[in-house]
Amino acid sequence: MSYQIRKVAVLGAGVMGAAIAAHLANVGIPSLLLDIVPADEKKDRDVVARTGLEKILKARPSAFYSKRAASLITIGNVEDDLEELADVDWIVEAVVERVDIKRALYSKIEMVLTPGTIISSNTSGLPAHMLLDERSEDFRHNFLITHFFNPVRYMRLLEIVPTVDTDPALTQYMQQFATEVLGKGVVFCKDTPNFIANRIGTHGFMSTIQRGIAEGYTIGEVDTILGPTMGRPKSAIFRTADLSGLDISLHVADNLYENVPNDPYREAFRAPEILRELVKRKWLGEKTGQGFYKRVKGSDGKSSILELDLKTLEYVPQNKVRYPSIGAARNSSDPKKQILTVLSGDDRASVFARETTADSLFYAADLAEEIADSIVAIDEAMRWGFNFTFGSFEVWDLLLENPEVLKKVFQGRKLPALVRRVIDKGQGTFYIGGVGQRKYFDFATDEYKPVPVPEGSISLQAFKASNNVVYDNGSAALIDLGDGVACLEFHTKMNAIDEGIIEMLHYAVGDGPEQFRALVIGNEADDFSAGANLLLVLMGARSEEWRQLEGAINGLQQAHQLLKYSPIPVVAAPVGRALGGGCEIIMHCNHTRALAESYIGLVEVGVGLVPAGGGCKELLLRQGASLETQKAGKTGGPFTPVRKAFETIAVATVSTSAVEAQELRFLRKTDAITVNRDLLLRDAKADAIKLAEAQAAGKWKPAQPQMLLLPGVGARLVLEQQVDNLLFTEKISEHDAVIARQLARVLTGGECSPLEPVTEQYVLDLEREAFLKLCGMPKTQARMESVLMTGKPLRN
């Protein structure tokens, strides 16, 4: 049977159900969001679903790429609208975690179900076989568990649990759909309680709390020890629990304790009384305003975060704890070295890190074959579900490769059977091989097999390992991706734009067409580019090297112009943050293939400057300031594009998604969006090939220079009046006003006539002039220094 998902019904409008509907809307799939009708409700029978949608619209961080997508969600209830389920392709059940309620709902669903409709449960821990009692053969054939992690938009993991009756074609289709359309990392799990991530993660959480309480560690100590230097997110243990909800953590632990009677580690799931007491008091974490942590406002109006004293259950000020091992680990940028440094230390932090690491690794190794088909599934579940840097077996390898640290962690304990097998029958580690040739130890055969990757995914590391680097100048590299396409990769710190990157842009566009038919600009870092190298700008300003600074800015501008008018197609592939100069690079490319989670903006005003790499010029053009658009009368006059660009740049607006970047005009409506990071470069390369083929067929031509029609001095006075009003009402500072006036001058065209078109270079000259003038001001230099030293903007 073939499957296709075009419309979905989500049953249950709680946090998870509404978030699933929101993410479906993000990728353009309409859904019905249905829930119960409250007893005695007469006025609004859809009130539960309506409330769920209203809450998810207010969620922070946003559940939607753009709130406009909420129009794809239709609310209703399971009494009046049940028959509408006959017209959907996929029904997602996301109701309360009770077997009786789920079974009763399935009975209702089956009465109206169209044969072949996909049915799945978002249960976080109930095995599938417990849910399907009395269901028909067709229902079972098209049923599986799809366990999303919260927040659905941001958490990559999707656990899929097929049953013995699930159609294999459905399992394969859902993997492809979730990967390509929803952008998820799919992990297949065996039908066991709480599957993989929650099984291992809850064991780690509960055993850590038990150890912490028993050994007298404070909440702050635990979260400091088991944070980033141990390959965990900053939220570590207790903050993560607050974010998830302590009631959820308790429910999952209780569910496991009840449903795994033969688990040799079962007592780890016996929740400590302190957790039960917090849930009893409704101190559930973030959603109730207090849990293990509590945010309070002082008499001075400033907020501070208190932590719970585990002995007295009173909130106390946080004490910054310092340990030699963690301090030493922070001196390294290598996450593996950081972990080894902490584990090999001799202080209180190292002792606790070794104990908890041993607990979690033993559990993963002993349970692997019961809950998963491979060690890869477990590692991906832990990385994608909890944002760990390494999965359980990747940490095992780190220790197996460092026997002295392994010995210190396990202190003579007999290693688990699976670990002994990889030592005796394998090559001593669970993974072998380099980049692009990685293999894992398959515990079903005791042989090594290739690590699965999404079809067509591109690894720049693998290309570089295969000697496909055309040129590398230390700041950037030009890599041959095959098929006549090259990739320009930045690899400076935070991919900040420096002279080396500017040189590589010139090389790629100048010499590239002799070797390639298209160019992709992308990388595998967390962020596309944080913008220009601010330290170099500040140093140049303070040493008054104005000629050198002006030359650098002009060089950046001309490099961007080369991109825009490149003789071959140039495709940008941004991911994460693309700020300032990073945004300007994107805006000068012929086409963009952005990851959905791209945060793009011209943020220069935050450091006391204005965009000077062509950002002002390009945003004006995208808002309709070109002579052609103005002649067509599409904007109602030349002031409208200026006003819109000013409103965006003056407050350093950054998009919260690629979709919002399109709304802000940082991206074009014709630019494309990919939701799965692993597939971004694959899709960008495909776009580049398509453009190159169009060029060969005479259907695509390089861009031609544009003229702009700008409103001139009169419009600048209007903007300056608005700035003066904000200054008068003390909504901005004196220096904010200085920056805004310089921006207004650039965007309105300086002293130009509103009747005479100006060139792109004219606007670039205005950008450069304003940038240099602001660079010479002490308050701008203070703002740059603040961001460099503290990472925080200064309002002076």
Image (cartoon, rainbow, N blue to C red):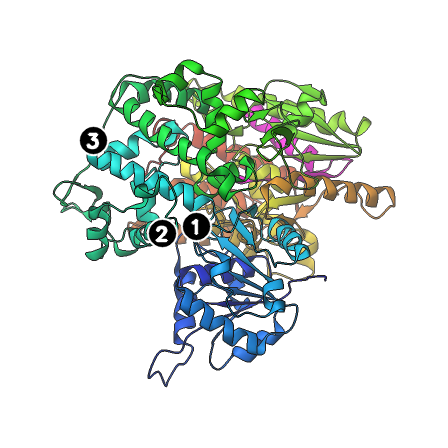
Element assignment for label 3? loop
Residue 641 place in picture, x, y as percent = 56, 54
In the displayed structure image, the side of residue 350 where residue 481 appears, left or right? right
Task: State if disc 1 and disc 2 touch (CB < 8 Å).
Answer: yes
540 relative to 454, above or below: above
Q: Return the residue at label 2.
A: 252
Q: Which residue in the structure is indicated by mark 1? A: 194
Amino acid type, residue under disc 2 in the picture: Val
Q: Is residue 325 magenta?
A: no
Report the span colored magenta.
Answer: 550-579
What residue is drawn where x is 33% and y is 25%? 354
Quarter the N terminus occupies: bottom right
Which residue: 43% across, 19% down?
337
Front residue of 430 and 687 = 430
**Above or below: residue 533 compared with residue 709:** above
**Of pointers 2 and 1, the one earlier in the residue sequence:** 1
Q: To which residue does mark 3 refer?
A: 215
Q: Secondary structure at mark 2?
A: helix
Q: Is residue 36 left or right of residue 576?
A: left
- How far is disc 2 from disc 3 in space, using C-alphas? 24 Å
Placement of 154 over or under 532, stated as above or below: below
Q: Residue at x 43, y 32 (%)?
A: 774
